[in-house]
């Protein structure tokens, strides 16, 4: 391996700074977009006063959090208290080293990119547990333990679906995976993987309805309960970076990434002149961002629609539904590849698994409604019997 020169180190540092700046800008846009989306869903306007259409409201919030007093509890473990948010944000930041925005827009492409991403994403769990433990607060410890239980449980479906996609593409390189979806995206071939990965990804970033470990109504903020100011903002900076990462991975693994319809035919018409040569990569980046923000809007829509799950419901859903479905995706993908079946067979097997599990979940969710209907029907039958008995007694008395 050749030695790394100073100029290579310089450009790596420049790339990391540029990536951090871009991610910070993305986080500001997501904060504004989430508040606007939830406002519309709740028949409100959302931010309107700070800047045009409230665009400067996230900037004002960021400045407020940076200038806010940073309080550290006397009984806390200072070293752990300080290092926990650093671990969380570094693990969220480092996975973007190998996530491409287009064919050439990536800081460092890795042949084992998906393996690298799943390995670094797990480190965030350690930061959350340390945050709760270092705070010396019983609610913080409870939130940290909840976060460990939830994130470890839902990490299994994420890894299993990543393995399924790697089997389909015969590679863990994200650029190869996107190239293999030039004709048909994997969302049409393995819809089960898309559903499982998206739901487990929501749980991984702690978005509603999986925000149980920092549920304000139960554990008063979870592992972040003793954090304030800049330290508190770092956790939510990591949450929004991870949300953007999950949406980007959904687009890359299942929606074709930066590939757009008739791309090769359209690019063949562009002349190879310098003023026009950059138009193709720019269109690819724009199309990729459109897909990513579309997935993020679905995430915000779910937050404004579904209530929070209980901890028992959340864990039961992980181990009784998501984990079996993820292993099922591995099995059907292996069958499809081993017997060299046509792609539609994998689609049918995926849809069949989703249909069966969806029906069982629906039956389980509707069981209380059915019991209430049975009780009401029984009460109505009893009232009808009593009314008939009274009417019969009245007729008997009139005779």
Image: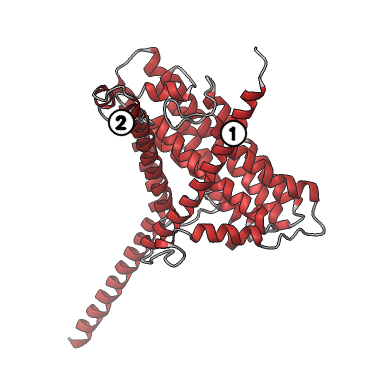
**In what quadrant of the picture does the C terminus appear?**
bottom left
Residue at (48% x, 59% y) in the render: 56
Q: Residues within 10 Å of mark 2 (few under 14, many from 20)?
A: some
**Residue 14 circle label:** 1
Expressed as whole percent of the image width and height from the top left, the position of residue 77 reads 80, 51
In the displayed structure image, the side of residue 148 where residue 299 appears, left or right: left
In the rendered image of this protein, does residue 37 appear above or below residue 6? below
In the displayed structure image, the side of residue 162 where residue 43 appears, left or right: left
Choose between 360 and 146: the one closer to the eye.
Answer: 146
Q: Tell me how far mark 1 sits from mark 2, CA to CA.
A: 30 Å
**Residue 183 circle label:** none
Q: Earlier in the sequence, mark 1 or mark 2?
A: 1
Expressed as whole percent of the image width and height from the top left, the position of residue 67 reads 65, 61
Q: Which residue is mark 2?
A: 260
Expressed as whole percent of the image width and height from the top left, the position of residue 287 reads 34, 36
Residue at (37% x, 18% y) in the render: 336
Expressed as whole percent of the image width and height from the top left, the position of residue 125 reads 64, 41
């Amino acid at each position: 391996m050749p030695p790394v020169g100073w100029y290579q180190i310089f450009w790596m540092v420049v790339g990391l700074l540029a990536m951090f700046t871009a991610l910070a800008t993305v986080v500001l846009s997501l904060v504004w977009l989430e508040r606007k989306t939830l406002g519309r869903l709740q028949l409100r306007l959302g931010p309107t006063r700070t800047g045009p259409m409230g665009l400067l409201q996230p900037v004002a919030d960021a400045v407020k959090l940076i200038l806010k007093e940073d309080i550290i509890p006397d009984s806390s473990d200072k070293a752990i208290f300080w290092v926990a948010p650093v671990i969380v944000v570094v693990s969220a930041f480092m996975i973007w080293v190998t996530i491409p925005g287009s064919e050439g827009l990536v800081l460092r492409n890795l042949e084992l990119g998906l393996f690298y991403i799943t390995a670094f994403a797990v480190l965030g769990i350690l930061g959350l547990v340390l945050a709760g433990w270092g705070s010396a607060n019983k609610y913080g410890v409870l939130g940290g333990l909840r976060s460990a239980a939830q994130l470890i449980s839902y990490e299994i479906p994420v890894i299993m679906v990543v393995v399924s996609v790697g089997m389909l593409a015969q590679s863990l390189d994200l650029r190869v995976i996107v190239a293999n979806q030039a004709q048909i995206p994997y969302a049409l071939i393995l819809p089960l993987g898309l559903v499982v990965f998206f739901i487990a990804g929501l749980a991984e970033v702690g978005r509603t309805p999986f925000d149980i470990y920092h549920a304000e109504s139960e554990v008063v903020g979870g592992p972040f309960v003793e954090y304030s100011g800049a330290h508190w903002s770092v956790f939510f900076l990591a949450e929004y970076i991870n949300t953007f990462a999950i949406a980007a991975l959904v687009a890359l693994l299942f929606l074709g990434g930066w590939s757009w319809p008739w791309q090769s035919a359209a690019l063949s018409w562009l002349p190879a002149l310098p003023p026009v040569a950059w138009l193709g990569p720019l269109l690819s980046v724009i199309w990729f961002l459109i897909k990513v923000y579309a997935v993020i809007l679905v995430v915000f829509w779910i937050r404004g629609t579904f209530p929070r799950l209980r901890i028992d419901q959340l864990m039961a859903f992980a181990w009784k539904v998501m984990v079996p479905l993820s292993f099922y995706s591995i099995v059907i993908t292996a069958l499809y590849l081993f017997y060299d079946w046509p792609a539609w067979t994998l689609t049918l097997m995926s849809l069949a698994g989703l249909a069966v599990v969806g029906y069982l979940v629906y039956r389980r969710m509707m069981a209380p409604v059915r019991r209430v209907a049975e009780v009401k029907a029984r009460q109505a039958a009893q009232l009808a019997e009593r009314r008939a008995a009274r009417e019969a007694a009245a007729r008997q008395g009139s005779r």
